[in-house]
Structure formats: structure tokens, C-alpha cells
Amino acid sequence: NAGVTQTPKFRILKIGQSMTLQCTQDMNHNYMYWYRQDPGMGLKLIYYSVGAGITDKGEVPNGYNVSRSTTEDFPLRLELAAPSQTSVYFCASSYLGVNEKLFFGSGTQLSVL
Amino acid sequence: QQQVKQSPQSLIVQKGGISIINCAYENTAFDYFPWYQQFPGKGPALLIAIRPDVSEKKEGRFTISFNKSAKQFSLHIMDSQPGDSATYFCAASNSAGGYQKVTFGTGTKLQVIP
């Protein structure tokens, strides 16, 4: 099993550009999440999804959008990239939504210059 | 009230020594306390977790101690090895609301020197 796969691993964007971070999981998990990780700040939840067609905002959703058309895929969209979005982004999934293990991808390192 | 405070920010331990990382929380509604281990260039991976009805949980060289009255919990790594060098995140989650709302600590970078 591949688990949670994220692409790309690295990306440099110019201010104002847009891009989509891809995330796919092959564990048939209902719940999927996007986190950003900044030095000394831990992980902050951007958006989450409890199943195909259902998404909701986390702690830091501004500047991002998501969609969930299938159980497997949960892409994160940056519409107008800003330097404040320079971060490492992690996608995660879990089978149940309550008090259980999160499975993380290996991350996407994004720089906005 | 949703914060989880983690200390120290970094830690250097000799091989064979005990590594101790501490976390404190405020929200008494938290009901699940996992620890995640992250190696450079990788995503976090669940190491060990505890629920508040238990004061201690041990898995191999890793032990969580939980003090419900003090709202504190800690990770102890016995006989620390260079392969344990990683960043450790404590976390807390609240099952209310129907999904896993996880609050992470800010992380501790552990270096185990030979």
C-alpha cells in the first residue's frame, strides 16, 4: 500500500500565481485533512473532509480552497499565492474521525517569492 | 483554551540516556493524547497515544505519563538511541463535533549523540 501520496514534493511560486497540491490515499479512509507546518508553530489545520462531497474549514483556511469529489483524492488549491503561504503542507487521512491515528503524507515544501 | 504547550523546543541527550518531553493543555474536553514522531523530510507518524482514564502507557522504550489533575502529559524515551533523533509533537484531540479535531504542540527537536 502506498498510503497517503502527495505531489509535488517541492515547488516555488511567484506572488499571485496559483497552484494545486495533490493528495491521494489508497486506504479507503473517510476523513482527510490538510495541515501546514511552520517552524516552531506545530501543525495547523487548513481544511478537512469527512467524505466525498463534504468539506469544512479548519483553523487557517484563508487563501486556500479544497474539493473532495472522490474518497481517494483531496486537492488543496492556492488561488493567489502570498509569501505568508510559504510553508510545508501535509495531507493526512483517517478511517474514523474520532480519536485515532492520522496517516500523513511526506509533505510538499512550498516557497512563495 | 485549545492550546497545547510543549517543552523544551530542543533537546540533546547522550546515547543511553533518558529523553523527557513535556506537554500541558487547558481544555478539559480533550480525550485523546497522541505523540507523533517526524524524521526530516517525512510526515509525522503516530508513535504512542493515551486516553485520560490511564496514568501511564508503555510501548517498548517509549512511555507516556499522564497527570489528569495537573493537565500535563509527558513522553519518556528510555535508553535513547541516535535513531531516535527526530522532532516529536504532542497532541490532544476532542471527539466532540464528530470529527478528530487535533491540536498539536509546537514540537521538540531531539538529538541523541553517540
Image (spheres, rainbow, N blue to C red):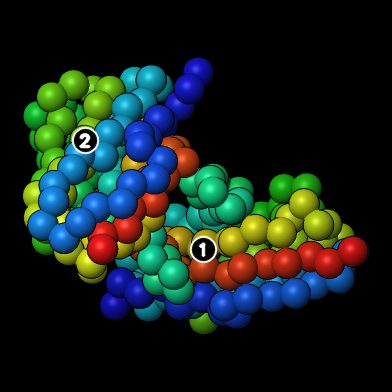
Q: Are marks 2 and 1 in contact (CB under 8 Å)?
A: no
Q: Is A65 placed left or right of B32 in the picture? A: left
Q: Amino acid at mark 1?
A: Cys
The relative height of residue B65 versus residue B42 in the rendered view (above or below) is: below
Q: Is residue B87 above or below residue B27?
A: above
In the depicted structure, whether residue A22 falls above or below residue B19:
above
Q: Is residue A100 visible?
A: no
Q: Quadrant of residue B57?
A: bottom right
Q: Split into 4 quadrants, where in the image is the C terminus of chain A?
A: bottom left
Work out whether residue B46 can be spotted. Answer: yes
Q: Nearer the viewer, residue B14 or B41?
A: B41
> Disc 1 sits on a residue from what chain?
B
Q: Which residue is mark 1?
A: B90
Residue B7 horizontal side relative to residue B13, left or right: left
Q: Residue at x 23, y 68 (%)?
A: A84
**x, y (%) of residue B93?**
37, 57
Secondary element under disc 1, as helix, strand or loop, is strand
User: Where residue A82 appears, x then y in whole percent?
Assistant: 17, 63
Residue A55 position, x and y percent, is: 13, 40
Which residue: 45% across, 77% down?
B5
Of B94 and A27, the residue lying toward us: A27
Q: Quadrant of residue A80?
A: bottom left
**CA–CA distance between discs 2 and 1?**
27 Å
Q: What is the number of callouts on the image?
A: 2
Q: Residues within 10 Å of mark 2 (few under 14, many from 20)?
A: some
Q: Please report the residue visible at 52 percent of the width from the left and 68 percent of the height from the top.
A: B107
Chain identifier of the residue bearing label 2 in the image: A
- Position of residue B96 measured from the top left corner of the image (x, y, whole percent): 25, 54
- Tag of residue A24: none
Disc 2: which residue: A75
Foreground tag (2 vs 1): 2
